[in-house]
Image: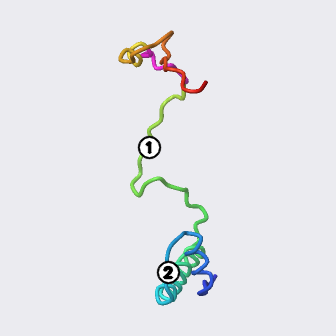
Amino acid sequence: MSVDLATVKRVAHLARIAVNGDDAERMTGELNTILGFVEQLGEVDVSGIEPMTSVTPMLMKKREDMVTDGGIADRIVSNAPATAENFFLVPKVVE
């Protein structure tokens, strides 16, 4: 894939980036270099290689996924100026 000057200007416009003519030409070369590198990565044979989360082997920290109220609702609302049944009470703002 190759990027031309019109594409760089369009992307800059969509990103709301002010780019003058000299910068746009420089960016065209830089983007083509980056896209060329990405295409090279696509040619690498990664069959049989498992995805990894780190370069060093480690186990993922896991916990049981349980829905709870935290058991501290009383402490959470204790500093509120007004509460009712562990809910915050706020003044009505819309009539």
Identify the residue under disc 1.
59
| Nearest the eye: 11 or 28 | 11
The span picked out in magenta is: 67-73
- Residue at point 41%, 58% (across, down): 55
Q: Secondary structure at mark 2?
A: loop
First in sequence: mark 1 vs mark 2:
2
User: Is the C-beta separation of discs 1 and 2 under 8 Å?
Assistant: no
Q: Position of residue 39 (x, y in %)?
A: 58, 78
Q: Label 1 neighbourhood size at 10 Å, few (<14), some (14-19), many (20+)?
A: few
Specify the amino acid type for callout 2: Val
Q: Find the residue positioned furthest to the front.
A: 95
Q: Is residue 4 magenta?
A: no
Quadrant into which the N terminus falls: bottom right
Residue 65: image quadrant is top right
Quadrant into which the C terminus falls: top right
Q: Position of residue 90 (x, y in %)?
A: 49, 20
- Residue at point 58%, 66% (across, down): 46
- Residue at point 47%, 53% (across, down): 53
Q: Position of residue 29 (x, y in %)?
A: 51, 87
